[in-house]
Image (cartoon, grey):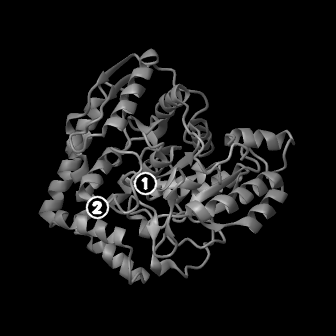
Amino acid sequence: MLRHAQQARLVRERKISSVELVEAHLDHIAKINPVIHAAVEVLADRALAEARKAPQGPLGGVPFSVKDSIELAGAACTAGTLGRAGAPPSSEDAALVRMLRGAGAVPIARTNLPDLLFAFESDNLLFGATNNPYDVACTSGGSSGGEAALIAACGSPCGLGSDAAGSVRLPAAFCGIAGLKPTSGRLPREGHFPPAGGWIEALWQIGPMARYVEDLRIMMQIFGALDPGEASVRPRVAFYTDNGIAAADGEVSRVVRAAAKALESEAAFVAEDRPRCLDMAYDLEMKLLGADGGDSLRQYLAELGSTRVHPLLTAWLDKLEPYRTGLAGFQRYWADWDLYRAGMSAFLRSYDVIVCPAYIHAALPHGASTLDENFRGFSHTMAYNVAGWPAAVVRCGESATGLPVAVQVVAGPWREDLVLTVAAWLEQAFGGWKPPPLISPGS
């Protein structure tokens, strides 16, 4: 349950060896993974071999995990899709994996995700579904759901996910941990499968996930994307609970409002407001992903040899079909995108930070994410993919049934420092991550 910085300090002070730290995590994964099905491959022998070399650096000896779409040298990267079931081991680490290992961290597991990353639940034909550590009848979210579940259940202190419509933030919210989608293009995306490319590249980013905001900050510093120290400004904060597309339910709304209230002592001012263009976000994300009705995705799956796909992916493809258009239509889509980004930028004249829902409910039951009344709620995270802005989530409450409820914190481009500072304030005010029921007090 320690922060990864604390774990690294224990190793440096020789109060625990890196081998003992890795062994403790491996033992814990063996206990929890049969329940949550978060890790698709546990790298036990390799992790212990690396730990025996006593790796040096700010994260010397600390384990980490990676989503099964991020390359790890010597391990196969399946992206959860049938055609990659026999994929050869990757020849080299993804860029961010290389940076973490350079800081002394030790890869310990690869984690579950949806079929080719296309779902807000982590379920596929290769490995099955990942369960939420707080209620196994609920999803851990997607697409970085295995990563979020493993971290929440203390199988890994930190890791990497990727986010094109909320795929870091939504699972982090459902599992009660902290997660960050950096500014689009802020971090290298080398070594991700599928690879970056085309206009969709502007929608997504690899991002860090951890139980604590402090650990996100340390990872961003290791990645060379954040200076030490905290933002010194008193931000102007806007908050909302309804984006004009899908309103948050009562439980989520109360948590967001409580978070906004808690910021009044730290902020220059706090006001209920939202960008006027925000109600464009859902259609805009779907237009950009579905201008060809999903044909390029179908072709890509065929080229991979994914002759069958998971029903969650089929449902995604069905939702893209109404957005099929021609060249003239795509030109209009692009104009809409420019209009949206201009409107979002104009909002920054009045505010520095936005506090809002990560999603309209706490974690959903398995299989419920594609229902229309639930799917449009993912517009709360999509809004900041199409804007390209940095956004983090942090747990600030829980539902009546004990599921985590998170708040999303957003700022303008390149202001990850501000996002993480405000997220840390909220974590301090509300406690952040809490152990799920399957974690015993002595774990």
The crowd level at tag 2 (other Cα within 10 Å; few <14, some 14-19, many 20+) is: many
- Percent position of residue 443, x then y: 71, 47
| Quarter holding residue 201 | bottom left
| Quarter holding residue 221 | top right
- Percent position of residue 278, x then y: 24, 40
- Is residue 69 shown left or right of residue 93? left
Q: Amino acid at mark 1?
A: Ser
Residue 354 visible within the image: no
Look at 55% across and 56% down and name the residue there: 147
Q: Nearer the viewer, residue 67 or 217?
A: 67
- Is residue 300 shown left or right of residue 441? left
Marks 1 & 2, CB-CB < 8 Å contact: no
- Is residue 145 shown left or right of residue 154? left
Q: Secondary structure at mark 1?
A: loop
| Quarter holding residue 357 | top left
Residue 51 visible within the image: yes
Q: Amino acid at mark 2?
A: Leu
Q: Which labelled disc corresponds to residue 289?
A: 2
Q: Which residue is mark 1?
A: 167
The crowd level at tag 1 (other Cα within 10 Å; few <14, some 14-19, many 20+) is: many
